[in-house]
Image (spheres, coloured by chain):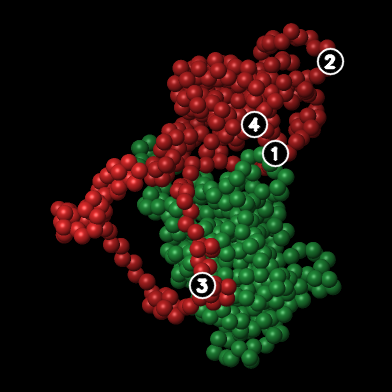
């Protein structure tokens, strides 16, 4: 180790990097100095390097092949390697496929945490399923899963949406029945759940997640879909972990213009969820019970109106 | 993980696979240059020059000494894997869509598309390793015709049962087993509604997984041809592999057409999906490709995988320790918390 004082060149130059063995047998401390040319400030960089030896057994055939094989074909040019093989600058991790993310954004950088988050979410979903089975609630709506049997969304005209094609009133009732089944899920979290209506057809759970997540942690996003067509029914429930977050979201997003429609936000109704197709009459518009046209079918898709 | 990008191909990828030892990665694309790469570093070792059309399929023998390629130029070519020398070219009557070595490497089978007045064919050629290349017969030992009236095309071919049967998948979603000596149909099943894009076996050839345009991949028992599991996604599945070391399935798929502008049409969002083999649950996705993923391969040591996409890139991923150590929580325990 030469003393920097004795160096022959520029006495003001920083010393060259020095490596020192520490008490732990595979850890080395490397001390180096960087000078900022503009300000002449000297930064001391201390790196703690752990040297780990991993040994792997490789078949003799492989080693011999590696020694034998030379470049051929188009790879035999001299400088080609820089262009053809590149290490990605981004760190990619195995991400959670579900739209619902119970982890924070800053966990995303740490791949091990992200994976643990995946497993947690996966396991949490299993627990929920177990509970549902125990209490005999119907299976989760297919919109929740990472893509169950959803086909690509195709437009189906309203007249062909209801199965059986009978009167529109029937379809409304069957839909109400669907909603009643699914609505039971909101018992535990309904205090923090917002019902968001007048959502465009193209909006997905992921979009809603993106829209509402700035306000706080979301425990669940449920986008209502028609059972047969998987078409979005234009409303959704967003459950926040904290009530205050939900209130702030309500305040800020009420009347928000989202994809050419104006959102309407309300507190979700407990047990049974707030929904459009209830049998109970609920007059939210000026028309009340009597509508000028016989539009029972169409009514089911405009969430604010009743039958 | 920090994937390594392999940019050697100018057009979309059609095939990605590791050799038996896991030290070489083979890729083929709609450009005419099948390529071999170092599976550890991603370094391009060589290209097999000679085809004049898209290369649809490749197969490397177990000792990695000989390589077969199937091309739209209506030939199947035999190469010396290590030097890139073309040993023989087998002319066909139509584009060759698939090729597979028999166990032992003395025979191989090809499937070719119909072309003009010619029917689609399944052909078996003899290329005994001990005989000189010049002696190889360019006429197949056996030809099975798929008559035009049925309008079905074969999409994959594999030798099964220690060369007793030929396993062929079709674009109508069916699978047939042919007798290798006579060409008669031994068995057939129809598990998918739409085209079976690719099929992939485990090392012992006791399980196989089919990837279909009907948005699902299905796992089968190879001996009984019985379906075991179904993995559902929201887009056509182009390729799927069974992990050799974990109970995981990796799937890659694509959009139906670029007309779908919402959802995953965003840049870099075409993803490889990870499913648990037994629970059929999707537990992870890896993004990064800029086009639908056409081919996936996993290294026989289970520590890395490669995906090739429509964007012409192959991405070589080395799994993090967290994935390799990952334990798959059992879905329904006795109510105990798993330790993460």
Kindly identify the residue that appears in the image at 58 percent across and 86 percent down: B128
For the colour green, the matching chain is: B
Look at discs 4 and 3 and give the one toward the viewer: 3
Which quarter of the image is occupied by the C terminus of chain B? top left
Question: Disc number at residue A293?
Answer: 2
Distance from Cα at disc 4 to Cα at disc 2: 29 Å
Question: Disc number at residue A78?
Answer: 3
- The answer to whether residue B1 of the structure is visible from this angle is yes
Kindly identify the residue that appears in the image at 70 percent across and 47 percent down: B258
Q: Earlier in the sequence, mark 1 or mark 3?
A: 3
Q: What residue does disc 1 label? A: A153
Q: Which image quadrant is residue B9 in?
A: bottom right
Q: Earlier in the sequence, mark 1 or mark 2?
A: 1
Q: Which image quadrant is residue B153 in?
A: bottom right
For label 1, the SS is loop
Q: Earlier in the sequence, mark 1 or mark 4?
A: 1
Q: What residue does disc 4 label? A: A203
Q: Earlier in the sequence, mark 4 or mark 3?
A: 3
Question: Disc number at residue A120?
Answer: none
């Amino acid at each position: 180790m030469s003393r920097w004082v004795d160096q022959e060149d520029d006495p003001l130059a920083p010393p060259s990097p020095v490596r020192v063995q520490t008490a732990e047998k595979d850890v080395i401390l490397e001390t180096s100095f960087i000078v900022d040319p503009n300000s002449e400030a000297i930064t001391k960089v201390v790196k703690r390097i752990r040297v780990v030896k991993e040994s792997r057994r490789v078949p003799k055939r492989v080693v011999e092949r590696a020694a034998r094989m030379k470049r051929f074909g188009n790879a035999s040019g001299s400088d080609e390697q820089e262009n053809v093989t590149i290490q990605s600058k981004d760190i990619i991790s195995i991400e959670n496929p579900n739209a619902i993310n119970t982890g924070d954004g800053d966990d995303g950088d740490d791949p091990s945490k992200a994976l643990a988050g995946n497993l947690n979410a996966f396991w949490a979903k299993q627990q929920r399923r177990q509970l549902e089975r125990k209490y005999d609630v119907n299976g989760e709506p297919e919109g929740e899963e990472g893509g169950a049997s959803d086909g690509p969304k195709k437009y189906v005209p309203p007249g062909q949406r209801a199965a059986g094609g009978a009167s529109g009133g029937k379809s409304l009732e069957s839909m109400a029945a669907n909603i009643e089944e699914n609505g039971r899920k909101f018992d535990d979290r309904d205090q923090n759940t917002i019902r968001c209506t007048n959502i465009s057809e193209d909006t997905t759970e992921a979009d809603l997640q993106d829209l509402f997540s700035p306000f706080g942690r979301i425990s669940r996003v449920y986008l209502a879909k028609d059972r047969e067509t998987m078409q979005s029914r234009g409303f959704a429930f967003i459950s926040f972990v904290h009530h205050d977050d939900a209130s702030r979201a309500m305040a800020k997003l009420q009347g928000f213009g989202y994809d050419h429609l104006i959102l309407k936000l309300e507190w979700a109704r407990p047990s049974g969820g707030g929904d459009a197709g209830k049998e109970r009459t609920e007059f939210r518009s000026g028309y009340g019970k009597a509508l000028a046209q016989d539009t029972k079918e169409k009514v089911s898709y405009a969430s604010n109106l009743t039958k | 993980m920090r994937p390594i990008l392999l940019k050697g191909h100018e057009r979309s990828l059609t095939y990605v696979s590791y050799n038996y030892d896991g030290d070489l990665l083979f890729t083929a694309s709609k450009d005419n240059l099948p390529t071999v790469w170092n599976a550890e570093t991603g370094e391009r070792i060589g290209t097999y020059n000679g085809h004049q059309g898209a290369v649809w399929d490749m197969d490397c023998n177990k000792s990695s000494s000989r390589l077969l390629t199937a091309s739209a130029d209506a030939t199947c070519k035999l190469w010396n894997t290590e030097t890139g020398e073309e040993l023989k070219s087998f002319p066909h009557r139509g584009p060759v869509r698939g090729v597979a070595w028999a166990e032992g490497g003395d025979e191989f089978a090809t499937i070719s598309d119909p072309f003009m007045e010619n029917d689609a064919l399944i052909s078996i050629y003899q290329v005994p390793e001990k005989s000189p290349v010049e002696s190889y017969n360019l006429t197949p030992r056996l030809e099975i015709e798929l008559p035009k009236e049925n309008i079905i095309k074969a999409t994959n071919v594999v030798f099964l049962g220690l060369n007793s049967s030929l396993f062929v998948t079709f674009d109508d979603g069916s699978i047939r087993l042919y007798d290798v000596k006579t060409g008669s149909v031994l068995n057939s099943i129809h598990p998918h509604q739409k085209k079976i894009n690719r099929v992939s076996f485990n090392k012992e050839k006791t399980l196989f997984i089919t990837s279909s345009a009907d948005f699902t991949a299905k796992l089968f028992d190879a001996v009984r041809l019985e379906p075991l599991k179904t993995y559902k996604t929201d887009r056509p599945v182009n390729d799927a592999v069974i992990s050799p070391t974990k109970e995981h399935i990796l799937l890659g798929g694509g959009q139906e057409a670029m007309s779908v502008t919402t959802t995953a049409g965003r840049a870099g969002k075409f993803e490889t999906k990870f499913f648990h083999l037994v629970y059929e649950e999707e537990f992870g996705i890896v993004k990064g490709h800029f086009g639908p993923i056409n081919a996936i391969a996993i290294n026989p040591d289970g520590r890395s995988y490669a995906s090739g996409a429509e964007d012409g890139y192959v991405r070589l991923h080395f799994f993090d320790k967290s994935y390799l150590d990952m334990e798959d929580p059992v879905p329904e325990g006795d109510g105990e918390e798993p330790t993460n």
